[in-house]
Amino acid sequence: MSSDFTWMIGGPQGSGVETAANIFSQVFSKMGYQIFGKREYYSNIKGEHSYFAVRISDKQIRSSIKGTNMLIAFDAETIFRHANDVLKNGIVIYDSTLENVKVSDVITFDNDFKERLESFLKSKNKDDTIKGILELASENDVSIHSVSFRSLLIELSEKLENPRIKNMSRMFNVLGVSLSLGLLTIPPEKLIESVNSIFSKKKIIAEMNVSAANFAYNYAAAKFENADIKFNTYEIEKNTLLVQGYYGTSLGKIIAGCRFQSYYPITPATDESNFLETNEILDVDEDRPGSTLVIQTEDEISAIGMAIGSSLTGVRSATCTSGPGFVLMIECLSWAGINEVPVVITFYQRSGPSTGLPTRHGQDDLLCAINSGVGEFPRIVYASGNVSDSFYDTANVFNYADIFQVPVIHMMDKFIASSVTTCQRFDETKINIDRGKLLDKVSSNDYRRFEHTADGLSPRSKLGLENGIFWNTGDESDVEGHISEDPVNRVQMMDKRQSRFEYILEKIPESEQIMKHSDGEFCVVSWGSTQGPILDAIEMLKNDGINIGFIEVKLLHPFPKDLLKKLFSHSKTIIDVEANYSGQLGSLIKQNLEKDPDYYILKFTGRPMTCTELYNTLKKIVNNNAEKREVLTYGA
Amino acid sequence: MALKVGDYKTDVHNDWCPGCGDFGIVNSIQMALAEMEIPRHETAIFSGIGCSGKTSHFINVFGVHTLHGRVLPFAQGAKISNPNLKIIAVGGDGDGLGIGAGHFVAAGRRNVDMTYIIFDNAVYGLTKGQASPTLKLGEKTKSLPTPNTNYNVNPIGLAITSGFTFAARAYSYDIRHLKDLIIAAINHKGLAFVDVLQPCPTYNDINTRDWFNGVDRKDETTQKPMPRIYKLEDTDYDPVVHYSDETELNQKKTQAIVKSLEWDNRIPIGIFYKNELITPYTRRLVDKIPNYIENPSALQNISKNHTPTTKIDEILDLYKI
């Protein structure tokens, strides 16, 4: 029985690596396993290296580990990049025709990597070929299975008497996953069921892939030496979903009543808008169908501008972007700030600066989200730690926007966006909609949009509302919304808006501001998607008898400093964990609590943290042999 | 009770320079709204930044004074969300054709049913007279240190090639004519563009009121000024695309562009191009959301007693293991 297993498939972008991984994930999720998959790819359409690692376990998992138990490779680059990463007693299935390919033959390698790899192989006295690197793997007790993918296709083509099949190298992906399942002696009907479901939209293609799957499965079962790994089948936990990372915010928007989303294409944010557009027509209780209108705009400025225009009509509106798009929105964001317009910006971070690593992970835009803007105005910056949280959080951020009449920036990232996980079915009954002081009727004729009130929040009219006429301007304005440069009015208006910060901290429940996962003398503090690897690492440490606390800050602006201070009081050592260079949350802690975290664990390679790396580093800290700043670097 | 022009005026102090062409535009908009008897709460004026940006504060309907160059995105977002609103976007030529040029082109492609009026005076007034995108190459208005080094944008031509389905030019000192054009623009089914020639008495000392009136060129016999402005409707010019046919469409577009290039001695105003055979944006949405017109974003109920009314069961079932 194997309870924790990582399977990886790699290949050129466009070769169907993701489809293969989806088949694998479906098979194991239907066998009752928990799934955590992550996709890595270059900023490229076709040809560059991409890979998908799927971790399965009978226990809850929320991150990847360091290393792979099984690697499937139908191209040379995958072997060169990952063979050395296959764990002891692991398995490699690769295309035998690649054996003599040299490092220098792979044109898609970055020069730096090529040099590193060549000198690494030289240092191990191995040839700079596939054969060389696989020899190294077998010395690490990795069993190597070779098969010519092309010959498999030819045989299949003869068997089915379909000459077209022999040239269909795009089926290598299905062959690869099927070979691996054959070797692992997984019940074949699970494979076929999954292939059918993945290709359900095209019957002929489904049939062809089913044949290929059966053929490769049987081939591996017959020809490969038994892997001696056994996978039990478990009862599927009730209400389990297998979801892509961006489903959380997408479905959160739908349920929260977001009816307008404008966006400009950018990785890794666009998947969300695509999902919303695919599900544009909505089923509404006791009513005609509703709709989330999704509009692709000419740029991000227009995306936020339209979302604001929509919000002024009373619609819950949003946009979704990444760092380079967000910075284009800043002027409009400031306009929403001064005009107290609720609008949600879902911010799927990637790694900067500038274009940076456009398809890779990072959490380096926190301070940008908090600080960028013209002048001083209230906003909320809120972060989610995983796909499931992001569903409920999305519903909450729309409430915050409406109640506090501020723009809300909801921080997500590439790690969450391109992961595939099992999770509990999202519970719609937990969702509550609070539109704050939005009016749907004005009876008197002395309505004033920015009327001063005890709580600083004025009743909010919308375009089209009778007697509710108002004015907006990016200039400072009076209570009606007309331009005013009067110094006394200026102070009143600044006070009105800026008082929102304290009010927000007072009104948002503490449990929504900060999530305290565990207690410990050593306490990790973090935000966003590091949640998964941290929780997994803490569990690993628990098995070693070490208890580590974990505080996840969700409300990052306004900063809940008093609450955090209170929560920190139980811990002696604070460890800041973030996927950026400088420890941006750490700097907020330093600024607000006048206390520098004792340690920083940072990663900014563009690859997400693994629980293994975190486990090792936290252990170093507990054993008092860590540096103040520990930098993680694992991952291809 | 019928609304009067006065009902569309606010008591906000108007701080435009004396003699500014903007006054004619704001008056024309107010007159048009009154004549059309559009209820105040069903109308919104969106404006950009600059002198013209203040327009929304002077009109007693919803007023959204946005950002430099961004008036069209804000206005389109509102109109698409609530198609029942009458929306007029206004802004300067620098706003719409300089910093906002990308939005201008994209708006044409969408053809959202609303009106966009450009206050075209060839200078950036509020920042003290720099060259705007409509100033001609080589011209030197009085606050320019050196003559303009850029070729000018042709607003009518750009509008037509971008997909605007109504393109007109007006002159801000001919208020009645301008008012009629605004009414035609509002009534047009699609995105209507009105380029208003609007002398800036403070910074544009070339295209002045006198210049438009032809004071510098007198008829030799009568010794009377020969005005540069003339009206297309006084000629046999036909701006309307009458039927869906490539030849007809190309002919109407081409003649409008050629016509819009007339300048210096004879400057045409009026409707250059009108095509209601192109579907407006909200109509296009019906192809993917059949009930969008009856049930647009702004009219949908999203909750009942704080509980969401949207059902996501069917979507979630797709991902059930």
Image (cartoon, coloured by chain):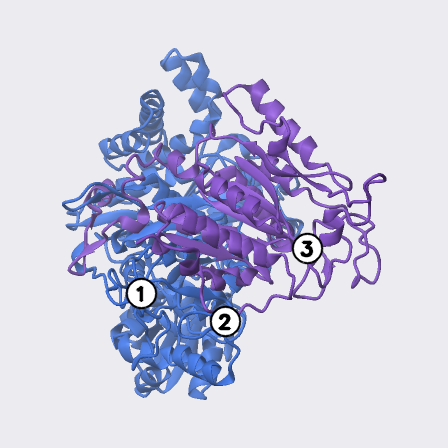
Chain colours: A blue, B purple
From what the image shows, is residue A634 above or below residue B311? Answer: below
Identified at 57% across, 20% down, the residue is B248
Left or right: A611, with A288 as reference point: right
Identified at 43% across, 68% down, the residue is A339
> Which residue matches tag 1?
A402
> Which residue matches tag 2?
A483
Q: Position of residue B66 (x, y in %)?
A: 50, 60
**Lower position in the chain sequence, tag 2 or tag 1:** 1
Q: Position of residue B88 (x, y in %)?
A: 47, 50
Q: In what element is the residue under mark 3? A: loop
Left or right: A532, with B98 as reference point: left
Looking at the picture, do discs 3 and 2 lie on one chain?
no
Q: Chain of mark 3?
A: B
Q: Position of residue B289 (x, y in %)?
A: 32, 37
Q: CA distance from mark 2 to mark 1?
A: 24 Å
Q: Amino acid at mark 1?
A: Asp
Do the CB atoms of the residues marked 2 and 1 lie less than 8 Å apart? no
Identified at 71% across, 66% down, the residue is B128
> Which residue matches tag 3?
B199
